[in-house]
Amino acid sequence: MTGLAFETPLGARVVIAGRERDYFSGTGYLGLHNHPQVIQAAWQAIQRYGMSTATSRGGYGEHAVYDALEKQVCAFFDSQAALYYASGYLGGAALVQGLAGRFERLFVDESAHYSLGDAARASGKPLHFFRHRDASHLAESLRLHLRAGERPLVLTDGLFPISGETAPLDEYLPLVQDRDGLLGVDDAHGVGVLGANGRGTAEWLGVSASEGVQVCATLSKALGGYGGILFGSRERIREIESQARVYVAASPPPLPAAAAAAKALEIARSEPHLRQRLWENVALARSGLRRLGWEMPDSPVPILCLRARPGVDLARLRADLFERDICVAHVTSYSSTPPGGALRIAIFATHSREQIERLLDTLGKLL
């Protein structure tokens, strides 16, 4: 796949290597990255303000564009306050640094995104990994490793990027609350697509926002922009803002990216039919893949993981699909990749029924 690059904007149909192809990869779940209003917002910001403030947030680094974005984050997630920072990858570090005074020991899902493992290790505090999505093993680890007076910080993805699994946040939270701890969730892939309002995995599982949970996310996936976000109560966000070095000492994202993200958030909030269309497309794709022999849970998650199975060469299958102008990803080593690798199929709200049926029909013939 090296050397292959987009020759058109991201979308359900793209040009790669000189040919138009159906695109079932990446993370543009709601189709907002190329939305005309999003592009217009970025264009207006760069014309009026240029690229950046050329300094970190605070003092002269503050800007009306960042204020507008953070207001949109609060409106979308129904939160009191929000922080916007350079990259979703930094969310775990912002959370760990910003809330360092609230925990003494960390517990991390063994398949969590690299950013959470990096953040936990950099904290310098004792660290333990628990089995992937295993609440009983987490409970055992908390019992074995927490010393008298210690409080845990449990870190996990909300929606895992390759396997398409969701963390059992509703099972983790009581374990954490019983020990006066915190549950930290990187919901990069869940926000925008899960839950009645698109607020992510916690909303979908019925886990209400509370002082026991802190979510970080990114605007670069379903929400059509760029940069990381944290949101919550005013007191919690003020605490993180004052303590997280990756926030106070890093340059913020470019102003056009912030303006684009603000508009994308507004569209995602005011046009819920985008999520409905996405869920309908996901249901169609999952049903068809079940008929082709893959186990597919009944879920609105737009990440479809085709795990290795006897007699199927996933690398060859990916290449054969590409030759037929269908793009999916073959993954062997990324976080949450199942044993033996997987084909990762991403479904967008902007995919047509014909595209999804063509994908399923082509897969059936190749198999």
Image (cartoon, rainbow, N blue to C red):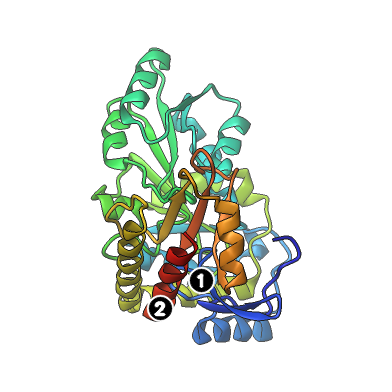
> 231 above or below 244?
below
Where in the figure is residue 51, as x and y percent of width and height? 70, 74
The image quarter containing residue 72 is bottom left
Mark 1 to mark 2: distance in Å? 10 Å
Q: Amino acid at mark 2?
A: Ile
Apparent side of residue 168 relative to residue 89 in the rendered image (left or right): left
> 45 above or below 26?
below
Going 48% across and 51% down the picture, which residue do you hit? 161
Q: Label 1 belongs to which residue?
A: 224
Q: Label 2 belongs to which residue?
A: 267
Apparent side of residue 40 relative to residue 168 in the rendered image (left or right): right
Apparent side of residue 46 relative to residue 116 in the rendered image (left or right): right
> 161 above or below 11?
above
Going 48% across and 76% down the picture, which residue do you hit? 32
Quadrant, the N terminus: bottom right
Is the C-beta separation of discs 1 and 2 under 8 Å? yes
Where in the figure is residue 105, as x and y percent of width and height? 48, 24
Where in the figure is residue 228, as x and y percent of width and height? 54, 57
Going 67% across and 86% down the picture, which residue do you hit? 47
